[in-house]
């Protein structure tokens, strides 16, 4: 029995408003659906993750060794599309796994962990004066900020899943809001905060094409540092509320 009747192939909108990414919704997921459509029943999601990582590493190496700029940026774009495609395949084939999720996250860590310090170095070479070295620090800090965001998110989700299990045994879980509300908040998130994972790739491609590395690093540093600090505060507050609610379960 085929998998095509279990889950629709065309990507649905994210359920959680904070997961709405402008680039992913408009470019990444639709292109991934088109490219992978012929192999949607046979392609291995983990293989797509590995291919995405390879494309990103080759593209980053192309930038580092001053290879063809447009070819290198194109590879980064393809890597972004495939990064959306692995999850699409896993859900369609009903092959979501802990291993695949971990592999996907590690691929992102490696990709951005190498790319952002490199961009910081490019900005450093464009800068003049004693302050120029700050761009290298900023590039590394961007990578750290992404790690903080991911770490705080998954720690929270781990504890939240345990609480949800307790709630299911004691009371009905509260409604998280209507579908229309989620769509509205999702649209607002996508429009007014275009600095999610896929969005960052577009920022990198567009501004690198014009060699605007200093401005790029400043924008990425400001956006990712802010969201990392917000993530820490918000997750700590959420976990504090979970602790309080667990006292009554």
Image (cartoon, rainbow, N blue to C red):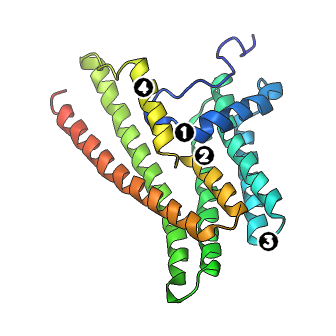
Q: Is residue 185 above or below residue 100?
A: above
Secondary structure beneath label 3:
loop
Q: Are discs 2 and 4 less than 8 Å apart at CB? A: no
Pick whichever of labels 2 and 4 is earlier in the sequence.
Answer: 4
Asked whether, in this view, residue 8 is left or right of residue 234, the answer is right
State the separation of the CA atoms marked 2 and 1: 7 Å
Pick whichever of labels 2 and 3 is earlier in the sequence.
Answer: 3
State the separation of the CA atoms marked 1 and 3: 30 Å
Q: Residue at x 32, y 19 (%)?
A: 175
Along the viewing direction, whichever of 237 and 74 lies nearer the viewer: 74
State the separation of the CA atoms marked 2 and 3: 24 Å
> Residue 66: which numbered mark, if any?
3
Along the viewing direction, whichever of 182 and 215 lies nearer the viewer: 215
Q: Which residue is mark 4?
A: 182
Name the quadrant of the C terminus: top left
Secondary structure beneath label 2:
helix
Secondary structure beneath label 1:
loop
Q: Residue at x 81, y 28 (%)?
A: 39
> Residue 198: which numbered mark, if any?
2
Secondary structure beneath label 4:
helix
* Residue 13, percent from left and from top: 55, 26
Q: Which residue is mark 1?
A: 21
Q: Residue at x 28, y 18 (%)?
A: 169
State the separation of the CA atoms marked 1 and 4: 14 Å
The answer to whether residue 212 shows anywhere in this view is yes
State the separation of the CA atoms marked 2 and 4: 20 Å
Pick whichever of labels 1 and 4 is earlier in the sequence.
Answer: 1
Q: Residue at x 74, y 70 (%)?
A: 64
* Residue 77, percent from left and from top: 72, 49
The number of numbered badges drawn on the structure is 4
């Amino acid at each position: 029995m085929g998998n095509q009747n279990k889950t629709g192939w065309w990507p649905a909108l994210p359920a959680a408003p904070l997961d709405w990414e402008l680039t992913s919704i408009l470019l990444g997921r639709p292109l991934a659906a088109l490219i992978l459509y012929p192999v949607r029943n046979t392609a291995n999601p983990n293989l797509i993750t590995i291919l995405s990582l390879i494309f990103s590493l080759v593209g980053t190496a192309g930038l580092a060794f001053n290879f063809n700029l447009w070819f290198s940026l194109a590879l980064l774009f393809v890597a972004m599309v495939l990064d959306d495609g692995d999850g699409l395949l896993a859900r369609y084939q009903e092959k979501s796994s802990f291993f695949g999720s971990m592999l996907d996250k590690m691929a992102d860590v490696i990709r951005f962990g190498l790319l952002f310090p490199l961009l910081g170095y490019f900005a450093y070479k464009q800068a003049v004066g004693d302050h120029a070295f700050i761009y290298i620090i900023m590039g590394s800090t961007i990578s750290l900020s992404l790690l903080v965001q991911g770490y705080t998110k998954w720690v929270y989700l781990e504890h939240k899943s345990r609480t949800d299990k307790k709630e299911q045994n004691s009371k009905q879980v509260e409604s998280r809001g209507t579908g229309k509300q989620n769509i509205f908040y999702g649209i607002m998130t996508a429009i007014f905060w275009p600095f999610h994972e896929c969005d960052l790739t577009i920022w990198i491609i567009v501004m690198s094409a014009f060699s605007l590395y200093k401005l790029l690093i400043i924008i990425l540093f400001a956006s990712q540092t802010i969201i990392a600090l917000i993530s820490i505060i918000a997750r700590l507050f959420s976990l504090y509320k979970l602790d309080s609610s667990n006292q009554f379960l």
